[in-house]
Amino acid sequence: MVVQTERDDATWYECETCGLLFDEQSDATEHEKHCDGSDPSYIQ
């Protein structure tokens, strides 16, 4: 599920599975469809 959150006077959309933040709800929803709960590979 995507959660709307407020940070730094902006609205963000957070993937509840991994905690990644998106500025577009559609991006967050699309990400969440494919999210397996592991850390994103590009964050090392």
Image (cartoon, rainbow, N blue to C red):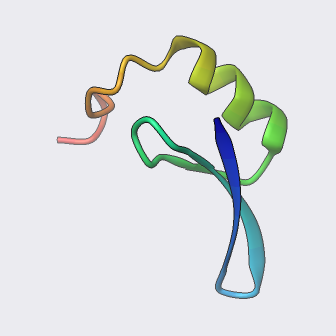
In the image, what residue occupies the spot 61% across and 15% down? 33
Q: Nearer the viewer, residue 18 or 22?
A: 18
- On screen, residue 10 versus residue 38, left or right, reads right
In the rendered view, tell whether residue 44 sits above or below residue 33.
Answer: below
Identity of the residue furthest to the left in this view: 44
In the rendered view, tell whether residue 35 sits above or below residue 12.
Answer: above
Query: Which percent across, then down, holds residue 11?
Result: 78, 69
Give the image quarter of residue 30: top right
Give the image quarter of residue 7: bottom right
In the image, what residue occupies the spot 33% across and 31% down? 40
Query: Which percent across, then down, holds residue 39?
Result: 27, 34
Quadrant containing the N terminus in the rendered view: top right
Numbered marks: total: 0
Quadrant containing the C terminus in the rendered view: top left
In the rendered view, tell whether residue 44 sits above or below residue 40.
Answer: below
- On screen, residue 32 versus residue 40, left or right, reads right
Q: Nearer the viewer, residue 41 or 5?
A: 5
- On screen, residue 37 versus residue 21, left or right, reads left
Identity of the residue furthest to the front in this view: 1
Give the image quarter of residue 9: bottom right
- On screen, residue 14 versus residue 42, left or right, reads right
In the image, what residue occupies the spot 44% across and 35% down? 17
Q: Nearer the viewer, residue 1 or 36?
A: 1
In the image, what residue occupies the spot 82% across and 32% down? 26
